[in-house]
Amino acid sequence: MDPIITKRNELLAQKVIKGLASRNMTGYYAATKEEALQIALGLIDEGNSVTMGGAMSAHEIGLVDAVKEGPYNFIDRDAWEDKRAAMLAAYDADVFLASVNAMTDDGVLVNIDGNANRVSAIAQGPKKVIFIVGMNKVCGSDVDSAIKRARNVAAPTNAQRFGLSTPCTKTGACANCKSPDTICCQFLITRYSRHAGRIHVILVNDNLGF
Ligand code: SF4
């Protein structure tokens, strides 16, 4: 990462971490993907059941492979035939790995979901939620700027990734659609965690995910 950008990210991350603390959530700053991986693994106990909600960022820092290969019980939704059973097992997991679609620089997390398995597990269920967040996802202090990023950058890109039949996969821009394939069904804004020690946000000095 360019040293000038790194300096900016280090400074901005301190503001984000302070904002997270004011919301009963814990923030961390990782200068590299490798450092982010070590911080994340330090938050997972041996024998923990671990699952995830389509978090590209967790893949990009090597966390998913490390969990699969490590002394944990990885709940792999894709490997389960009974998808409902897999979803319920994920809801009861010790640890849920995720990223955000966007967040404010004072610690509000914004996520959009189609099936809602991801946003529901973030809101309730798993005992601990670990977010891996590239600094590219940090917006201004107003929630509207984070929602705009989630709707205009993250959602159209994710729709493209899944090859969906939506207006945004044809134009690259959100058309506020109600098509059957839309992934913009449920919006979750996490502004405070009732449960201390449940939500951990690892800010990474890198561009991760969409
Ligand atoms: S609302 Fe529709 S067009 Fe807009 S990002 Fe979501 S899926 Fe794409």
Image (tube, rainbow, N blue to C red):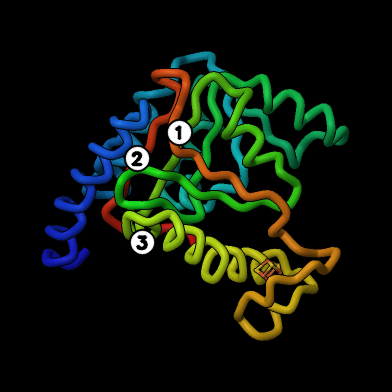
User: Does 176 appear above or below 196?
Assistant: below
Callout 3: CB less than 8 Å from ligand 1: no
Which residue is tagged 1?
130
Which residue position is annotated with label 3? Answer: 136
**Residue 202, label in figure:** 2
In the depicted structure, whether residue 111 falls above or below residue 52: below
Q: Which percent across, then down, holds residue 79? A: 76, 37
Q: Nearer the viewer, residue 164 or 155?
A: 155
Which residue corresponds to the image point at 52% horizontal and 69% vertical from the top-left? 153
Of callouts 2 and 1, which one flags the residue occurring earlier in the amino acid sequence?
1
Say few, some or many: other residues with alpha carbon within 10 Å of mark 3 (under 14 / 14 to 19 / 20 or more): some
Residue ID at (59%, 32%):
123
Give the residue type that dot 3 points to. Answer: Asn
Residue 73, image x, y percentages: 60, 21
Farthest bottom residue? 171
Label 2 sits on what residue type? Answer: Ile
Tag 1's secondary structure? strand
Name the image quarter holding residue 52: top right
Distance between mark 3 and mark 1 Cα atoms = 18 Å
Across and down, in percent, residue 147 comes to 50, 59
